[in-house]
Image (spheres, rainbow, N blue to C red):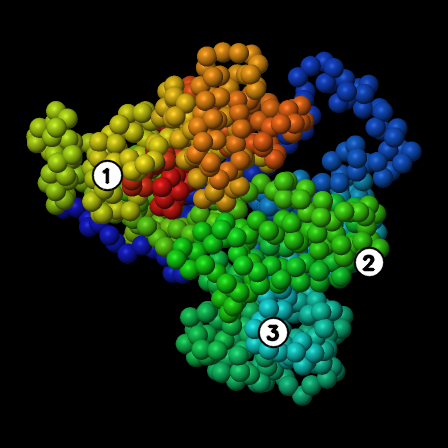
């Protein structure tokens, strides 16, 4: 090892998200979109295509049967095709994400991303369509004939005023919902927050004065929605770059601005804000000055929604008004106005009643549902993201968190109900309680779970040591960890080799990335003594411990965590899991009274299951199986699941007989005696555990639904099954998560990707395995 340079010090200040630095590099963003299959979407069949009979049913001649049925009754398209769960995300790229007019093709990554959000948050299938024209008439003509293919149209990133023309005309021409999210999504989330601000400040909606700065698509949509919610038209002033939109003004006007022109003698934004109660900013950075804020009424409400930089930052606002309530579009401040709270769930409700439109009443219902949700006690899934401070309805919590699992059951139900009440629902839902339960079962909680864990770590950044710091993938992961404001990344390795690998990978070793050379670290001697104290009665001499501490990076990194010089550790890229685990367990003790195991999260087709033990126990005894079940259920709860644990075997409830199945049956009896506080049953096959119909053949089964925690009878079956799921079934597998150690350590599989390393580093930082 090269020992020429002194070590960089452990404990550099973590890079926090409120420093407004980008959370990724250009190279990371490009690599993310290029890796594997380029882009973010693919088409996956929902029916088996394994046999000639399958193909005959799917295509010719079987497909002729639903074709004739739909020809006779068009409504059956919702039963026999994907139309009822399919939304088209359509743009011409004239107003891309604050980047402006970059063209239809350049908008495709954004539209693919929007489609992914539809699927992740509300299980709505979506496809992106980029229309290469700036002419509103041509755009309308290109889209109007697509109605038979989709259940709804989400327009995106189209500049004003064309967006108004296009949306209105398409809604008139098509019998499915047409929704321009840049307008209405922002308006709905902002209106929800505003409703709660009025409640907190004791204001009456009919007398509250609102100033909206920005007369584009979102600004005008906000004005229309708040007026629909009860704001007096004379109390809402709309401003643009030329000042107040007032009656009689001719400069820079159009029909959409004119519709909201006010009878007023105020002409500038500053004049409009004098004595105003609420400011909505949909304009540019710095538009709201501290002097303007000072002139507003007591307890002013400020929604500074310009992105990426708000009209005024919360820090600037609180410096001059300690009574201000402020929201922004940023995730690094409280009260984020985030469209993902709206559009997936609004379309979910609209699709489920086969709505012909998304009308104003449905938008108001969505806003009210969001507002009411923020007023309720948050569930543990949300609370876990706010380590040390459970969020409660108040000035810093007026809008629900994007990863609140209740969004899936509240907003679609409110939207569907409003659609039925206003006559735009072609398929009314007779039992809204049953609908709510079905939505809950449909939700894929992993997106929310991981988002919540990431947010929790951002709020309390950690020092995570990456043991294999000379590897390019590790360096990229460490950079991403720091860039995302998750804390400090400590790279164990020789400084010259880390720097060379970083340069080759195009990664800047920025503030928050710390290099530690084990050979010359001032802490190495202390680590060696710590190891000697632990291992001296296990055949290790002092010189052996010195060698381990100064040469072996796993031992050095684990010592950093054990002795408090780092908060968590991740390793495993270059060594087999079992070898890395042996290294770590020489340094870190098992948690007293707990079982050490590996728990994998498998995600396939919108379903998520936790699988144990995928890393540690080769052929567990009945006692060990029971202990594994208890640990796995505990982790499931920490991840936000209500555990339903299936004790798996090759047999189901006694058939066929066998000695190995008896081990599983005995594990169930042990759980019975311990009176654990979660659902469990077994022994059962995987088909019975995961398939509701198969489980129904055993009415005595104690599980209330398909299992979400699977306890495998042996390590080899667990490992084989998860890897087969990943390779053949297209499942995403996270883990194994190492559970049961006294300190936060996670081990990635050999040849893991940098994204896997980041995920495991965050899981370690959040101590999910503890």
Vertical comparison of 129 with 362: above or below: above
Within-10-Å neighbours for mark 3: few <14, some 14–19, many 20+: some
Q: Is residue 99 above or below residue 221?
A: above
**Where does label 3 land, which residue?**
198
In the image, farthest residue toward the bottom: 265
In the rendered image, which residue does mark 1 sit on?
Answer: 557
> In this image, 164 relative to 508: left or right?
right
Question: Circle 1 sits in a helix, a strand or a loop, which is it?
Answer: helix
Cα separation, mark 1 vs mark 3, equals 52 Å
Disc marking residue 422: 2
Q: Earlier in the sequence, mark 2 or mark 3?
A: 3
- Identify the residue at horizontal 67%, vertical 40% (top origin): 125
Where residue 557 sits: x, y (%)? 23, 39
Q: Give the crowd class for mark 1: few <14, some 14-19, many >=20 residues within 10 Å.
A: many
Q: Decide if residue 207 is on the left or right side of residue 641.
A: right
The x and y percentages for residue 220 are: 68, 68
| Residue 293: percent from left, percent from top | 51, 79
């Amino acid at each position: 090892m090269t020992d020429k340079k002194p070590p960089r010090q452990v404990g550099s200040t973590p890079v926090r998200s409120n420093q407004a630095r980008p959370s990724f590099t250009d190279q990371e963003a490009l690599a993310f979109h290029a890796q594997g299959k380029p882009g973010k979407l693919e088409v996956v069949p929902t029916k088996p295509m394994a046999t000639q009979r399958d193909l005959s049913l799917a295509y010719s001649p079987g497909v002729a049967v639903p074709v004739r049925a739909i020809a006779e009754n068009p409504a059956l398209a919702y039963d026999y095709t994907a139309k009822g769960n399919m939304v088209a995300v359509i743009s011409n790229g004239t107003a891309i994400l604050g980047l402006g007019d970059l063209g239809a093709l350049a908008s495709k990554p954004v539209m693919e991303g929007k489609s992914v959000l539809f699927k992740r948050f509300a299980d709505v299938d979506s496809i992106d369509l980029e229309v290469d024209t700036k002419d509103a008439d041509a755009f309308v003509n290109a889209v109007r004939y697509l109605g038979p293919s989709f259940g709804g149209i989400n327009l995106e990133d189209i500049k004003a005023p064309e967006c108004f023309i296009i949306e209105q005309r398409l809604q008139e021409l098509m019998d499915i919902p047409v929704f321009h999210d840049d307008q209405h999504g922002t308006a709905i989330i902002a209106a929800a927050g505003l409703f709660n601000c009025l409640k907190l400040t004791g204001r009456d909606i009919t007398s509250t004065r609102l100033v909206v700065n920005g007369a584009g698509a979102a600004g005008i949509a906000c004005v229309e929605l708040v007026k629909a919610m009860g704001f007096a038209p004379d109390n809402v002033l709309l401003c643009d770059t030329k000042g107040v939109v007032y009656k009689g003004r001719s400069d820079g006007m159009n029909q959409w601005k004119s519709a909201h022109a006010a009878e007023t003698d105020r002409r500038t934004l500053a004049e409009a804000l004098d004595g105003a109660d609420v400011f909505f900013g949909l304009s540019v950075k710095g538009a709201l000055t501290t002097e303007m804020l000072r002139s507003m009424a007591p307890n002013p409400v400020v929604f500074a929604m310009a992105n990426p930089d708000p009209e005024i930052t919360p820090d600037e606002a609180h410096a001059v008004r300690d009574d201000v309530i402020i929201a922004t579009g940023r995730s690094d401040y409280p009260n984020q106005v985030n469209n993902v709270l709206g559009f997936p769930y609004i379309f979910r409700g609209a699709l489920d009643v086969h709505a012909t439109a998304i009308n104003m009443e449905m938008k108001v219902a969505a806003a009210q549902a969001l507002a009411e949700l923020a007023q309720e006690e948050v569930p543990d899934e949300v609370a876990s993201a706010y380590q040390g401070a459970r969020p409660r309805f108040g000035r810093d919590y007026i809008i629900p968190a994007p990863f609140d699992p209740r969004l899936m059951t509240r907003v679609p139900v409110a939207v569907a109900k409003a659609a039925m009440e206003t006559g735009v629902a072609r398929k009314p839902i007779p039992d809204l309680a049953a609908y709510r339960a079905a939505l809950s079962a449909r939700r894929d909680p992993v997106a929310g779970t991981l988002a919540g864990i990431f947010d929790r770590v951002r709020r309390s950044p950690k020092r995570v040591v990456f043991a294999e710091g000379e590897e390019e993938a590790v360096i990229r992961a460490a950079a991403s960890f720091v860039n995302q404001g998750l804390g400090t990344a400590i790279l164990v390795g020789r400084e010259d080799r880390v720097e060379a690998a970083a340069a080759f990978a195009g990664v800047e070793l920025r503030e928050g990335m710390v290099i530690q050379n084990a050979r010359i670290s001032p802490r190495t001697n202390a680590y060696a003594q710590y190891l000697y104290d632990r291992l001296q009665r296990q055949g290790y001499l002092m010189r052996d411990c010195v060698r381990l501490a100064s040469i072996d990076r796993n031992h050095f990194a684990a010592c950093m965590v054990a002795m408090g010089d780092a908060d968590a550790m991740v390793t495993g890229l270059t060594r087999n899991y079992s070898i890395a685990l042996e290294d770590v367990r020489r340094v870190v003790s098992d948690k007293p009274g707990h079982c050490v195991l590996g728990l994998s999260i498998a995600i396939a087709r919108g379903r998520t299951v936790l699988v144990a033990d995928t890393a540690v126990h080769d052929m567990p005894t009945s006692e060990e199986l029971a202990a594994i079940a208890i640990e796995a259920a505990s982790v499931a709860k920490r991840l936000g699941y209500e555990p339903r644990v299936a004790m798996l075997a090759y047999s189901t409830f006694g058939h066929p007989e066998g000695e190995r199945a008896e081990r599983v049956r005995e594990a169930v009896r042990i759980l019975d005696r311990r009176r654990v506080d979660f659902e469990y049953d077994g022994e059962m096959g995987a088909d019975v555990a995961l398939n509701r119909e198969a489980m129904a053949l055993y009415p005595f089964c104690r599980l209330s639904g398909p299992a979400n925690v699977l306890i495998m009878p042996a390590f080899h079956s667990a490992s084989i099954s998860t890897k087969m799921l990943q390779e053949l079934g297209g499942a995403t597998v996270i883990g194994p998560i190492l559970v049961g150690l006294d300190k936060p350590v996670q081990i990635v599989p050999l040849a893991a990707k940098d994204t896997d390393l980041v995920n495991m580093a965050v899981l370690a930082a959040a101590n999910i395995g503890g």
